[in-house]
Amino acid sequence: MIDPGDSTGTARAGKARQIDTAAKRARLPQRKNPYWHGISGGRGGVSLGYRRGRGAGTWVVKVVIDGERTEERLGAADDEGAGVEALSFPAAVAAALQWGKQQFAIVEVSREAAHEATVPTVWSAVEAYAARRKKIAGREGSEAHLLSHISINGVFAKTRLARLTAKAIEDWVTQLQRIPKTKKKNKSEDPDPQLAPLKPGTRNRLLGDLRAALNATADRHRRELPGHIQAEIKAGTRIEPISEEARKQLLSDPQVRAIIEAAFEINDDFGYLVLIAAVTGARHSQIVRLKVADVQIAKSRIMMPSSRKGRKRKSRPPAAIPISTEVMDRLRSLLARRASTEVLLWRWVHKRVGNPPRWIKDKRRTWGDASEVKNLWSKTVELSGVPDDTIMYALRHSSIVRGLMANLPVRVVAALHDTSVAMIEKHYSAFILDMADELARRHAMSLNGEKNQVLQAAE
């Protein structure tokens, strides 16, 4: 093999220099560049070189890996006048091959180390998912709760996605416990073993966020991960069956009206928030994103923004929710002399001043997380006279059931509340059956040959 930089070899039309015997090497002219002879791997592989000097020559070796050349001196050649430690040609070839193996091994280890640094782990997947969700929503959500239940220094957090199994996820789920209210100084500390385990519903919500985080990372690194990882994630994050379905809190129309009036008595800003929640059945995260232009007076409707759930990148169009004239009259004061692009609902932020300290209004800002309404809602429940355990989400449940009992098609109810038909059928099946029963009764056959009274009335 002739080195590209060997002008003498090039002049001899590619004939390789003979360096396998001392006699042949003695006839070579002295020069700075070695005489190279390929011994493994072809061009760019391991090559043994002989550098001819004034005295005994020297063996050198080189290899080119990933475009990078590495060269090293092996020792003196067994030329005339060389010492006892001089290497013969066969010995030099063996030493060169061994050195070449070591270089390839070093490069391979470096590659693995670099790959290890980029291979996603459970922790990096959840962390990336949490950061992405926070960027989209502008605040922390349920994914922050998931992070708090994964010890950053734990075995599960350090598990590489390529080696993740359903059993590893299941083992993590079985040790989930409640986090104490007092925050620990070191977030990596494991939960107190005396704490009670999480409820099945809470575990299922954590599994939902974990599944979304792992699937997002697995999809992004699909070319680097084994093909079975998606199946492992699906099997490991399967939700637990809950024997007793959570009770749906349903409010009558008089109760809803009492809640609205109580909210306005406590705070006008909160009153408008509760009013819109009651008449639309929308989620808190949707309502707080309403703009002034979303309240369309001429058409008596509210254009409710879609929720930011799921993995769809394109946002869905807003839902047009009709509202009554009296509700629209009450919302008019929110729209007067305001820009159409301005956020619809605002609230006061208070600060503590003076001694003794007291709270005063400081500035206005938009509503944030749903937890901000906790105290205001508690006061509203007490003032309105509804059951003490009534939650604000009951306004959404009641709105959905109101639509079903009004004989609206399930698909229409689902669209108005930004959910799926499957979810409506799953959680409100009893009311759908009542609705279907009423519709079917209209077509019931009469034994005396007379038309159904409902049909007669319709005609």
Image: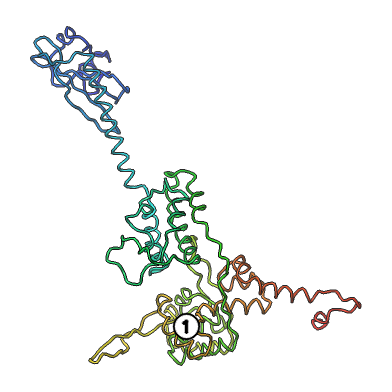
Q: Position of residue 33 (x, y in %)?
A: 16, 21
Q: Taking 55 as reference, is 289 left or right?
A: right
Position of 415 compared to 312: left or right?
right
Residue 454 in the image: state x and y as whole percent.
80, 81
Quick check: 409 left or right of 417? right
In the displayed structure, 118 sits above or below 386; it is above
Q: Which residue is painted at 49% across and 86% down in the image?
A: 381
**Which quadrant would the C terminus be assigned to in this image?**
bottom right
Determine the image quadrant of residue 89: top left
Check the image and report above or below for 225 versus 376: above
Q: How many marks?
A: 1
Q: Is residue 270 left or right of residue 65?
A: right
Give the residue furthest to the front: 194
Looking at the image, residue 128 lies above or below residue 398? above
- Residue 142 on image: x %, y %: 43, 67
**To which residue does mark 1 refer?**
273
Task: Classify 10 Å Cα crowding around label 1: few (below 14), some (14-19), many (20 and above).
Answer: many
Instruction: Determine the residue located farthest toward the top in the rendered image.
Output: 23
